[in-house]
Structures are given as structure tokens and as C-alpha cells.
Image (spheres, rainbow, N blue to C red):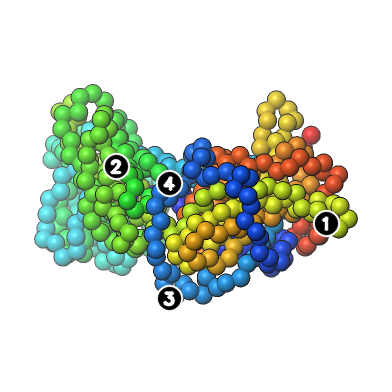
Amino acid sequence: MNFPRSFVQSSGLALAVALLGGCTSQPAASTPAPAPSSMTSATAALSAPGDVAPGRLFSRQVRADMRQAIAPGLVSVSNPVSPRLPLEAPLAPETWRSKSTTLHVAPGSAPTEIVLPVDVPEDAWVFFIPKGSDARVGEEVRKDVALYTPRGQRVDPWAERAANLQLGMDPAQTRERVARPISMLSLNREMGAGAYKVLVGARAAQVGLAIEIRLPASPVELALTSSAMQFFPGEDSDVTVGLTHPGTLDTVRFEASLYNPRFERDRGVPVEQVGGEWRARVSRVLTEQDESGVWVLEVRAVGTADGKPFDRLAQTAVGFVIPTARITAAGGARAVRDGAGKVSAFEVDVTVESQARDRYEVTGTLVAMDRRGLERVERPVAEAQVTDQLGEGSHTLTLRFDAGHVGLSGLDGTYTLRGLRLYSLGHNALYHRLGKGLEVRMPAVSPSEFATPELTPALEQMMQAGDFALAR
């Protein structure tokens, strides 16, 4: 199956690496809450692709085996970043498309016959995948499975030889190179469209078998698109189920199932027509009693289009988190000067509302506008992280960006806060992300006023590599 990129990347590891020598660590100090007028409410932020924001919080205790991760102690870190790198694009929902299906013969089954609808056999492939990893047993299963065209011609010996040649595989070496036995049968136009039959013998049925057919030339395609990057309990979040076809869709039946984070089939999901589209109503079947993590939605579409049968199967991953905290406001941006009058840091206050004791981490990136050339591009100039154990209530954490790190880019102008994120380190989960909507800007200061950054080994290595030298 295909998985999208990871939904949540905890920055706890990055923070630990920073403390080991890559960055500047600020001493723990309490930060007074700023005046309300200097803060921008998170509810007023404009939504950007990839943003996640919980509408409701839950009181949820950290598991006993994770309590070490929520020890008290304020830690604040500033990290230099190379302006040569593009500003990291937020993870946003992707559409996962399928022109294939997979049918399973469960281990311990009786001999059976399976029908595979093939509307366009050109460039099509059929895969027989025995259950388990015993190569010898897999060879026995391969000999106990036969594939027949709609005209009743047995095609698997010829198709397998053609497939191996097409892939450049030497039949004499295939048995040694493939640890998990698999037969790859290549179909073609001469075999004809229609209902192909797979005869599964007694030995193959006893071992179990997955049968996959891929139809890249078929115009019938199943597509899944999540409404959000991450789902929260009690909120209306769905997966849109799209089905493209060449002409008239005669009949269609959808079946949807959820697999839990251990990839065990867990429960069914209703698929309903809403307006002109179909939606798998995932939010209706997940509650605060379920575990956080990556759930997999599997949707099967079976029916006929222009009188021809089709069978499609698609999967997509769904992030599910039970939030105990969120960002309520950010602002109070200020320049901090040292005893010599130099600007040593830029600071931003972030207000966090919590309903459970946990170790929370707030991260953010300062960007500057690169005005050279025809295009204006935002480039990162510094990153900051702050983490502490917080209990129930409203708390203020301060992001502190080392001004020396900012000045290394050579980019001046107005520095703006981007990518504000709130993590739970106790649950290793992203709770809140605001990409661009807050528009928190630092006070205007000339780079000539910046203090010189502390030269750590990591910073020296970046400077020697030319990471801060922008091409003119």
C-alpha cells in the first residue's frame, strides 16, 4: 500500500540535538504575560494549507511509560537556518488515486474461484502474493493458482514469462532474489477484456493469497482526498471519494473500513452522497476513546460503467489526535538589547491554553523577504523552540530568536513569524499549526545593530559550507 508522508514530525529530537551543540540555548526564565492589546487572537488567523486547529480540548493524562518525557523545566533554543533553503511547505491533504484492486483469500480457506473484472487489458498486471514469507511454501502456492481469460484460455505460464522478460529478470535467478514469492503476470490486448477467472487450489487456499490487478490504461479511477491533514474528535472531517469513468456510471457500491495505528482492520465507515460528491464519514466513527496516531482508510468501489464491470480499491492515511492544548494568541513582538545596546534577540509571546498536564513545545520560524530579481521570495532566517511542562490553564511561552542568527542571512527589512506550531511531547503529537495567518512582525531594526552570534561548531560548519551566502 502507499502511505503519504508522515503526518506529524515531533521537534523534540531536533531540540535535543540543538542542546548538544548546534544552537544557542537561553537560560530558563519566567516571561510575564504581555498586554492583551499586543496579542493577535489565533481565531482571527487566516487559514493556510496544512494548518490544523482544534476546536475543542480534552482532559487526557499522559501514559505512565511516557511520563519521563514531560519532566518540568523551561528550555528555549534559537537555531540558525540557511536562507538558501526554501521555506518549508506545510503538509497538506493529498489525493491518492487508484486504478487497481486487491482481493484476498484468507488462510485456511477452501478451494475457490475469483473473478477479476478487466476493462482494459493493455499494460495490465496481475500479482499473486502468497501469505507469509516461506519461499518454499510460496512456490507451492504459485503452482496451485491458475488464471484464465474471458474466453477460457489459461494465460499464467505465458504471461509470467513475458513479465519476467519485460522486467529484465533472469528466471534462473528470480527464485534466489525474491524473498517473498510473487508472480507477476502481464496482460495484453489479445487476451481480451471481460471477466478473468482465478482458480485457487486447495494448497493455495490453505496458505492464503492476495491477488492484485493493476489497470494503468483504464479510464476508471478511484480517488481519495482528506478534508484536513489531521482529524480531531467531535469535528466534521471526511474523506471525499471520487470516481472518474469514461461515460455512464450504471451502478456503484462503496465499502469503507478503518485500520487502527497497528494496521488492524477495526471498523466500517459509512460512505454517503453529499451534494454532488461521495464522502467517507470518518469523523462519525472516531471518538475521544480511540487512540491517537495514523489510521488508514480503505475504500472499495464496485459497479459497472457503460455496461462493463469494475472493481477499484484505494487507501489513504488519516492522522487522528485528541488535543489537550491549543494556541490562543501570539504577539508582543520586541527587540531585546544587551548591555552594549546591541540587539541580542527578537522575542514573541505565545499564549497556550491547556486542559491537561503535559510537556508542550512551541516552535516558529522568522522569515525575511528576498527582493532581488523579479520574484519576491520569503526565506527563513532563524528558528526558535521553547518547551516546558504546563498544567491546566492559560500560559505564556516566549520564542526567542537570536538576532545574530537572523543577521547571518544578510536579508533586512521586516522579519515575520511563520509556521507557528504547538506539540505535545508527552503524546508525540502536533496539536496546532498556524502557517501565515497571524502576521506577527518584528520591530524594524537595522542589521548593523545586531549582536554577533556565538560561534558554535555547528554554526562554524554552516558558515564554512557557505550556507548563508545567497547568490546575487
Q: Nearer the viewer, residue 1 or 119?
A: 1
Distance from Cα at disc 3 to Cα at disc 4: 28 Å
Q: Amino acid at mark 1?
A: Asp
Mark 1 vs mark 3, foreground winner is 1
Residue at the image position 76 percent from the left and 40 percent from the top? 444
**Which residue in the protein does label 4 denote?**
229
Distance from Cα at disc 2 to Cα at disc 4: 25 Å
Distance from Cα at disc 4 to Cα at disc 1: 42 Å
Residue contact at pointers 1 and 3, CB within 8 angstroms: no
Mark 3 vs mark 2, foreground winner is 3
Instruction: Indicate the secondary structure of the residue bearing disc 1.
Output: loop
Q: Residue 64: which numbered mark, if any?
A: 3
> Visible in this render: residue 49?
yes
Distance from Cα at disc 3 to Cα at disc 2: 43 Å
Q: Amino acid at mark 2?
A: Ser
Which is more N-terminal, label 4 or label 2? 2
Q: Residue 338: which numbered mark, if any?
A: 1
CA neighbours of label 2 inside 10 A, class few (<14), some (14 to 19), many (20+): many
**Which residue in the protein does label 2 denote?**
100
Residue 242 location, x and y as percent?
Answer: 30, 35
Residue contact at pointers 3 and 2, CB within 8 angstroms: no
